[in-house]
Every structure is written in structure tokens, then in C-alpha cells.
Image: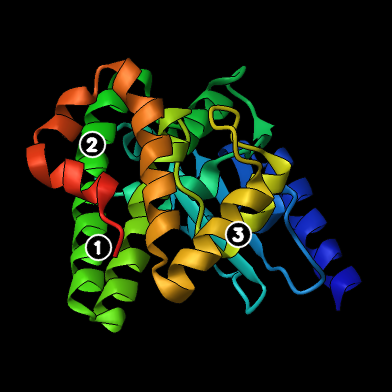
């Protein structure tokens, strides 16, 4: 099956290279990042000229199957999805670490892929401010549940805080938070460089928090985030919590 699927993909790639309407092509998903295994499908994006006749687009789309997820976009459509502020933020991580297989525009296709797969420098601060507030709020709620003896609530709030935490840690480096299914491979292949924890250490702390909402571990990560962001001008976000923030840091349960 794997050899047959590989041949099908190679046929699509060769056909696209020869097609005058095709301007670019890339693999997203696990194969585009080098995370694939024997059961991985092919997630194929083909970028076509704006004047491509609809039948030419449809002939590629008809190649979809259970293990080939192929879609086409015009160059104008792809530029829109690459721009920040659109409605396609949910799939931006799909384009992280992805290289163009076809780029007939002298590098523009790769530039657009990179724009989709990373956080623009000018968007880093507003994004971090938003997710930092959400992270502190979830952690605060988790600790309050611990204080009340509500372990289920504490775990659920702690679980929610992990997504915000990952948004912070990856967003600080201009990266999108990985899908959870890719998190371990992402951390080992493309380690975070701004924190002292290794990928395995961070995963161990995340496992501890999601399993038990462990108070001390949550507070350790909060202290790490504080040390990371306060020197970067985010101290006001922490300090807005005033005495609640001091309680979060000192609460012993």
C-alpha cells in the first residue's frame, strides 16, 4: 500500500510540474514536517494561476482518496490565507516547517508558506498579551478549585491552561502551537530554545498537570512564564492580577 501511495504522489508531483497552470505545490501535515509513519496520508496543496479554468482545478481534486487529501487554491486565494487576520488561523500550524515542492515564482510560494507557518513579528506582542491573560485565568481557576477540594474542576481548568501555556512558549519564538498529536515530535525535532526545560521535561510537567492538576508544578510553570515575559515588557499583565497573583504564587494547598 505504501509503495502504491508513494507512486500516486509522485505521479501528481510530476503532472503538476508539467502543468502550466500550476504555480506551486507543497505537502502539509505530518509528511511536510518529516513526522510521517507508514499510515500517514498525503496532504497536498496545489497553488494555481488565477485564470485556471475550473475543469483544470477539478481534475486534481478528483484525485482525492482516503489517503490523499488534495486541494487547490488560486494564487490570490493562497495570498489571502497567508495574510494575518483572516479566518484560517486554525490550520496555520499545518504549514510550519514546510518546504515548497514546486515554486515557479522564484521563491514567492515558499515565502507565502512561511508566512502561514509562522507568527509575524508585529503580531507577536498582541498575541502573547491575549494568551497570557487566558493562561493566568485558567491557572487561577484551577488553584481555586484545589483550595475548594474540587479535584475534577482543578484538572479541567489545568488542562485548559496547557493550551494557553503552549501558545505562550511557541508564540514567544514566533511559532504556532503544534497540534497535540504532533507535540512530542515537534519538541524533539524543533526544540524550544527560550526556556531552560528540555522537551521531555516540559512533557513530563504537562503530563503531571493534566493527570492531577498538581499545584506545585503549575506554580513552577507560572514562575517560568513570568521570568520569560516580564523582562520583555509584559509585567503589567501579571501585575493587573494584584493580590490574586501573589496568592497564585504562594498558595500551598
Secondary structure of the residue carrying numbered label 2: loop
- Tell me which corner region of the image, top left, top right, bottom left or bottom right, holds residue 183: bottom right
**Point 18% across, 53% down: residue:** 137
Q: Residue 67, position in %: x, y?
A: 67, 74
Q: Residues within 10 Å of mark 1 (few under 14, many from 20)?
A: many
Q: Residue 231, position in %: x, y?
A: 33, 16
How far is the residue under mark 2 from the one under mark 1? 34 Å
Q: Which residue is mark 1?
A: 143
Q: Is residue 159 left or right of residue 8?
A: left
Secondary structure of the residue carrying numbered label 1: helix
Reading the chain from its start, which is encountered first: label 2 or label 1? 2
Quadrant including the C terminus: bottom left
Dot 3 and dot 1 residues touching (CB under 8 Å): no
Q: Nearer the viewer, residue 118 or 58?
A: 118
**Point 65% across, 46% down: residue:** 199
Q: Residues within 10 Å of mark 3 (few under 14, many from 20)?
A: few
Question: Is residue 60 visible from the viewing direction of this image?
Answer: no
Q: Is residue 20 left or right of residue 211?
A: right
Secondary structure of the residue carrying numbered label 3: helix
Q: Which residue is mark 3?
A: 204
Q: Which residue is mark 2?
A: 85
Dot 2 and dot 1 residues touching (CB under 8 Å): no
Relative to 235, is 60 above or below? below
**Point 48% across, 47% down: residue:** 93
Front tag of 3 and 1: 1
Question: Is residue 127 visible from the viewing direction of this image?
Answer: yes
How far is the residue under mark 2 from the one under mark 3? 34 Å
Q: Is residue 62 left or right of residue 174?
A: right
Q: Nearer the viewer, residue 122 or 198?
A: 198
Relative to 185, is 210 above or below? below
Amino acid at each position: 500500500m505504501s509503495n502504491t501511495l508513494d507512486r500516486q504522489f509522485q505521479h501528481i508531483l510530476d503532472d503538476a510540474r508539467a502543468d502550466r497552470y500550476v504555480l506551486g505545490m507543497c505537502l502539509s501535515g505530518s509528511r511536510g514536517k518529516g513526522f510521517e509513519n507508514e499510515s500517514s496520508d498525503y496532504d497536498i496543496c496545489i497553488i494555481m494561476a488565477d485564470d485556471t479554468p475550473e475543469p483544470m482545478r477539478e481534475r486534481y481534486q478528483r484525485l482525492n482518496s482516503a489517503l490523499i487529501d488534495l486541494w487547490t487554491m488560486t494564487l490570490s486565494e493562497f495570498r489571502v490565507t497567508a495574510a494575518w487576520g483572516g479566518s484560517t488561523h486554525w490550520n496555520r500550524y499545518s504549514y510550519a516547517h514546510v518546504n515548497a515542492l514546486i515554486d515557479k515564482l522564484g521563491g514567492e510560494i515558499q515565502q507565502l508558506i512561511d508566512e502561514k507557518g509562522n507568527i509575524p513579528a508585529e503580531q507577536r506582542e498582541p498575541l502573547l498579551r491575549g494568551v497570557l491573560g487566558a493562561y493566568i485565568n485558567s491557572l487561577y481557576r484551577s488553584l481555586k478549585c484545589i483550595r475548594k477540594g474540587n479535584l475534577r474542576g482543578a484538572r479541567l481548568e489545568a488542562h485548559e491552561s496547557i493550551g494557553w501555556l503552549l501558545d505562550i512558549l511557541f508564540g514567544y519564538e514566533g511559532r504556532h502551537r503544534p497540534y497535540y498529536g504532533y507535540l512530542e515530535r515537534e519538541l524533539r525535532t524543533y526544540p524550544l530554545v527560550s526556556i531552560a526545560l528540555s522537551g521531555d521535561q516540559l512533557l513530563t510537567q504537562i503530563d503531571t498537570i493534566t493527570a492531577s492538576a498538581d499545584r506545585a508544578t503549575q506554580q513552577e510553570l507560572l514562575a517560568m512564564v513570568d521570568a520569560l515575559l516580564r523582562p520583555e515588557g509584559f509585567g503589567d499583565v501579571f501585575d493587573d492580577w494584584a493580590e490574586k497573583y501573589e496568592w497564585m504564587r504562594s498558595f500551598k494547598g
